[in-house]
Amino acid sequence: MPSSANLIAFHTITRREVVRILRIWMQTLLPSAITMTLYFVIFGRMVGSRIGEVAPGIQYIDYIVPGLIMMAVITNSYGNISSSFFGAKFGRHVEEMLASPMPAWVILAGYVTGALLRGLLVAAIVLAISLFFTRIHLYHPWITLSTVLLTSIVFSLAGFANAVWAKKFDDIALVPTFVLAPLTYLGGVFYSVDALGSPWREISHANPILYMVNAFRYGLLGISDVSLVASFAVMIGLAVALAAIGMFLLHRGVGLRS
């Protein structure tokens, strides 16, 4: 298939995903805005006023802003591609794409890009909301942006794998409820992992979300509980591994061909 045709196919899939996100914005964008506003009010203002500073010059509400943004990025990137691709599989649209001369990487890249754009939109919305509660000092812009991009890509690819293996719509909700939610809450969103005692501190370092949250926190606030090199190694490693899994699933047609 010529490169120009691949570009058209990629643009078509991405545009369809973006149109879907914007058409049902009350389901794709608004819930995160409402949920994160409640987090800022309850944890940031009410609880945060009692905690005070968690580091020199950093109030508790400032400390949780990066974690809340990453929480929104993770859930939206994962949820977008898992629901969208499973819907295409359920409607048998995937079979048409697999039967076309479109390469597997174009299909995967198109859906991931759509989920990535939703993740960036939600991140921008939550960041804008946070400005009503506190001031954000962007210490390292490129680290901040690259962390958001890598995190969104990782969980988009994870959502794709979930959508491929899911047999019914209920299977889509299992992973966010029983895997993503616990990992996110235990990933240092609301607290410093250094405050944990042994062995929980060591166990927490096995949580990949911990590295993503802390890399983003370093970009915004200049502080982190883990090594920045380790954080990017985890994110890049997961992205490569999940991309390979996604390509394998598409090439083999696992769970896609009737």
Image (tube, helix red, strand yellow):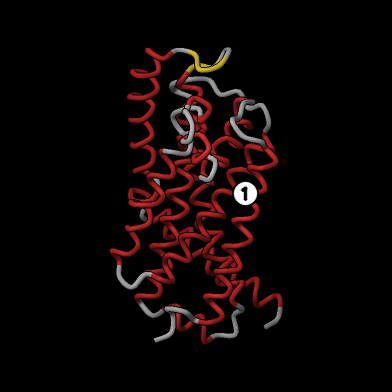
Q: Quadrant of residue 109?
A: bottom right
Q: Which residue is mark 1?
A: 234
Image position of 172 (left or right of 228) = left
Q: Quadrant of the image for the N terminus?
A: bottom right
Q: Residue at x 43, y 68 (%)?
A: 85
Element type at mark 1 = helix
Q: Quadrant of the image for the C terminus?
A: bottom left
Q: Quadrant of residue 102?
A: bottom right
Residue type highlighted by circle 1: Val
Residue 60 percent coordinates (x, y): 46, 20
Vertical comparison of 81 with 32: above or below: below
- Give the crowd class for mark 1: few <14, some 14-19, many >=20 residues within 10 Å: some
Vertical comparison of 48 with 166: above or below: above
Q: Residue at x 62, y 31 (%)?
A: 218
Q: Quadrant of residue 211?
A: top right
Q: Nearer the viewer, residue 237 or 121?
A: 237
Vertical comparison of 51 with 5: above or below: above
Image position of 200 (left or right of 31) = right
Q: Residue at x 55, y 72 (%)?
A: 107
Q: Nearer the viewer, residue 45 or 13?
A: 45
Residue 13 percent coordinates (x, y): 52, 68
Residue 155 percent coordinates (x, y): 50, 54
Image position of 152 (left or right of 82) = right
Residue 146 percent coordinates (x, y): 65, 44
